[in-house]
Amino acid sequence: MTVTIANAGFESADENGVIQGWTTTRAIHASGQPGTAYAGTRSLLIDRENSDVLLSQDITAEPGVYDLSLMVWANGPLKDSRFEANGEAVPVASAGAVQIDGEKTWDEIRIEGVRVESDGELDVRIYVEPIASPDFVGYIDEVAIERVGDLAAADGASAAPGDPGSAGTPIWQPVTVRGGDAQDQRIRIDGLEDGYYTLTVMTRNLGGWRQCYVYAGSEPGDPDGAGDSCATDPSQADVRRAAVPRNAFRPQDKDKWKRVTVRGIVVNGGGLTVGVHAEGESGVVCEFDDWRLERDARQDGEPYRLYIGGDITEVPYVVDQGGIFRDEQGAPVDPIAFAGANGWNIVRIRVFNETGKGHGGDGWYIPGGYHEVADGLKLARRTKAAGMAIQWSFHYSDTWTNPGIQMVPHAWQRKIEGLPQHEAVDVLEQLVYEYTADTLDRLNAQGTTPEFVSIGNETRSGMLLPYGSLDHWDALARFYNAGARAVRELCPDAKIIIHVDDGGNTRRYMEYFGAARDHGVDYDVIGSSFYPFWTQKSARQFAQFATKVTHEFGKPIMIMETGFNWTGNNGAGYPGQLTNNGPYGGPDTSSPELQRDFLIDLFNELRGVPDGMAIGDLYWDPVMIYANGNVHWSYRESDDLPGGNVVDNTALFDFDGRALPAFDAYRYNG
């Protein structure tokens, strides 16, 4: 239930532009300049003359639990600006996330779990910090309040502190594990109806563990896989594991609880073992409370599976440049086999049509022979040999594609040269179908049929530009459907993905996939890029976004790209592509342990999306290591000079190729 708040979008202003409907410590103005509103025509202006102010409203609301939100954009930090409701407060911290094509986006600021007691009082406040810089500008818009639960549920006797209540049957008492010797505590539950189940538990974990995870399965056994009943392969053991995330990435959150979700549990024979396994240094503590088990509403098909892995496309190039991949002890390894043996269950393989000099864009090219179909076919064989699923990404270009560049392959350009728009679209549609079908036929012939196929890469601006731009949605839909038709014919069991960047931007996805729906685009999965740097959003915020868009379109979501710094600078000693980790901190806080903890947090948030509608995460780029400075994005057409490597400080192997602690996030989430 949404609560009405006066002038929530700051549309109401007097003849002088002064905001109406809010109590303010002094007159404050709205902006009506084009492009400065998230919705409507006005927003709350933030600048040096319009700051150091408190806006408030006293609202009468039905008793219950509420979530509040607002949208914000600013060109610098808002320091101590904050959003408050009934004593709960969060920072209004936005610098306007900047996407790879230079576009700045709005951030959603949320306060969750606000209690309105029997008196019905809801006090909403926005405080804007004094602004010193004459160049600072920002905007706040669309304040929203939504009732999400009852006080009775929040006050349930079995609920852990801070927990608004959860579904399912309580099954166990509180558990606390402490660092020192390895610990394993478990309980056996019998008398269950066979089928698929979901387990949730509230946790409080400040971090510092080598291993700390919850597990559940039909048979008791050694959670580390020493016994057959809890082997590493869940399909053999019917055991699911979920690493326990840190409850706090900010000091002010250290007393909060976080829910851990274990999905895809199979009960066969009426019994289930639930347990906790932990290993860590003395002094670390993890608490567990409010254990709940719920039989899934959906009992047909396969049990839920979270696909976790990464992009391996760069492996042949890196190795040819002298790069050596190593395990944690420093022994050389095949990175694909290593990943498959250490928690990955899927890889991403992306392909360009024809790489090499003369086939680049903006004066840069990718060395010939890499990233092409023949290269991808070899990687697919290695992937299947390592026991992993394949996500195959068609770029439909000869070079990198993203929202800023979606270049038609050079060979295709020659085929449409001189043709009018409608005829060029006809030819490109057929070329997309033929190229896609031929590639998939070759994958089938060698026994490496992909489980997922994406039609394009980060196609927010469209694909095969300018023909398939958002100004030509009819043509874009034809291109999508040409690729989809080939998938349906050649790989009928594969899931089709449409991949867009800026994961967390709810409005963008509602508009984009709404247009895809209106134009009859055939697809199965919403693909999203999610980087805390590019989006300035946390894993929790991404999960909230995923809940909204999957509910709207009835399609599951898979993260196609995720990246996170493990150190502030790249191997060459300067900042890489991701200059910070968004809500997780700046370059000075980057560490291998924080990278691992982010992934654990992300995987848990994905499993917590209702109805299992978040199905996976693919890391990018996990293997593009420093390799003594020999690995580069691309080479300059004019003189063949290399362009550097701006992601080696986000890989899952360090500058010397040694596996990072991030692999623990994969090992203990299966």
Image (cartoon, helix red, strand yellow):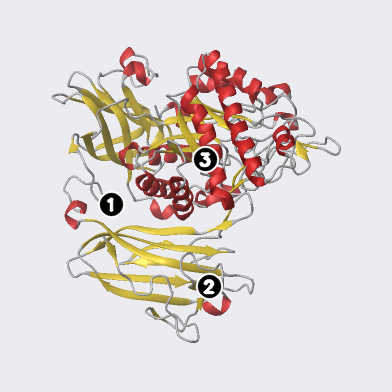
Residue shown at the point (40%, 31%) measured from the top left: 306
- Residue 162 badge: 1
Q: Residue 502's spot in the image, x, y percent?
A: 53, 48
Q: Nearer the viewer, mark 1 or mark 3?
A: 3
User: Which one is in front, 631 or 561?
Assistant: 561
Question: Alpha-carbon neighbours of circle 3 within 10 Å: few (<14), some, or many (≥20)?
Answer: many
Name the quadrant of the N terminus.
bottom left
Q: Where's the C terminus, which quadrant?
A: top left
Tell which of 496 and 562 is nearer to you. 496
Query: Taking the image as drawn, is residue 88 in sight?
Result: yes
Height in image: 272 above or below 141? above
Q: What kind of residue is marked 1?
A: Gly
Q: Earlier in the sequence, mark 1 or mark 3?
A: 1
Residue 283 horizontal/vertical position (percent) = 39, 38
Residue located beneath label 2 in the image: 46
Relative to 242, 186 lies left or right: left
Most extreme residue toward the right, as rendered? 639
Secondary structure beneath label 3: strand
Find disc 3 in the rendering and name its residue: 499
Mark 2 residue type: Ile
